[in-house]
Image (cartoon, helix red, strand yellow):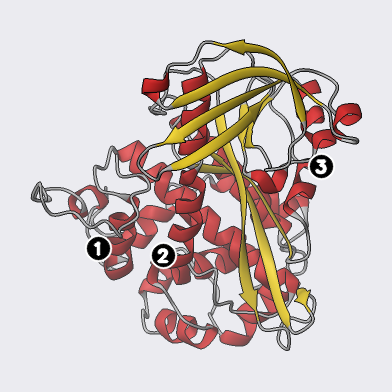
Amino acid sequence: MNTGRTLFSQVIGFLPMQRFRRCVQRYRGDYKVQDFTCLDQFLCMAFAQLTYRESLRDIEASLRATGPKLYHMGIGGWVSRSTLADANESRDWRIFADFAQGLIAIAKDLYAQEDLGIDLDSTVYALDSTTIDLCLALFPWARYQRKHGAVKLHTLLNLRGNIPEFVHISDGKMHDVNVLDILGIVPGAFYVMDRGYIDFERLYGIHQAMGFFVTRARRRFQFRRRYSHPADPGSGLRCDQTIITTGADSSTTYPDPLRRIVYFDAQKEQRLVFLTNNLELPALTISQFYKARWQVELFFKWIKQHLRIKAFYGTSENAVKTQVWIAISVYVLVAIIKKRLGLKQSLYTILQVLSVMSLDKTPILQAFSDWPEPPENDTNANQLTLFNL
């Protein structure tokens, strides 16, 4: 690497700029723009994510303090608080959403051979959502309850590498199950969901699209057993059954057989009942899928703690979506860099280093080389470990 470049510019060097320019042209983001381009906007917001800036004024002060380094960071326009606010307000958020999807496609290929922890070649997704609370007085478009505002981040996480392949931002009133209507189903892939996504008409849509789902059954789920299959109680399995639904609605909306698996978690002393349309895989493997679903919960906790998606730089819907999509882009970009450079540090550690060394002219490999091995007993149960590979 060129030692004359800042660490931030070296990170930005991994961006597929041709893809970004296509996204800008698709939505005419730079139409009649002379000074502060969409790329300048993206780099300013990416800098804010990496260095944990608190506000637009904070971003302005930090970037102006860099002086001549601003040009070498790739930012060609003069950074002002009002200009950045106007850009976030007016420029189509779909520019950054499409670009993030391009980065996700690159990361997906890089992590395609990542160990899933389960002996399976198929893709396994975890689907869930998280709610981000907002002040209704500042964000009137995000009405959630009578006196509260919120947005929901619906995410489909590829468990091979913890890459968010699908993200949908909605107001807080959108029910989780409705996201299944806009979710593109990949044939042969597994979709692991909690009970909030049980809608047998929509689940049957996944089945007809040749996808597989794994979810937990509700307590009053009505069914009739057709067959019972052998189950090893020593592994935690209590039963493995082929069933058909008998509820007033479910029997008509899902007419095909289902599989019901009962698993007892001895560690938590909890009895779990799973439903799936896959009739071939071992029952214990299906149970392990649901355990792996916890990765999407860790993903939400991680990005809320380490990226700027809880406090927003603008109050409009466009500004909020722009900030969220750029935060996701930064997350995926760092994951790409970690894989391409073969970095051993966790994603958390990489972001911490970048936050304090962004303007240092240190080769990126040197910044992460010669790290001492942590002591074997130096563990923190509260630390999230996404990408700790």
Nearer the observer: mark 2 or 3; the answer is 3
In the image, 300: left or right of 372? right
Q: Position of residue 211 (x, y in %)?
A: 70, 24
Residue at point 42% right, 24% down?
118
- When the figure is inspected, residue 123 is found, relative to residue 337, above or below; the finding is above
Q: Position of residue 139 (x, y in %)?
A: 73, 81
The quadrant holding residue 150 is bottom right
Amino acid type, label 3: Asp
Residue 371: assigned label? none
Q: Is residue 6 something one can see in this rendering?
A: no
Residue beneath label 1, please? 361
* Cα distance in 3D space between marks 1 and 3: 48 Å
Amino acid type, label 2: His
**Lower sequence index among marks 1 and 3:** 3
Residue beneath label 2, please? 306
How packed is label 1: few (under 14 Cα within 10 Å), some, or many (20 or more)? some
How packed is label 3: few (under 14 Cα within 10 Å), some, or many (20 or more)? few
Residue at point 50% right, 52% down?
297
Residue beneath label 3, please? 181
In the image, 269: left or right of 327? left
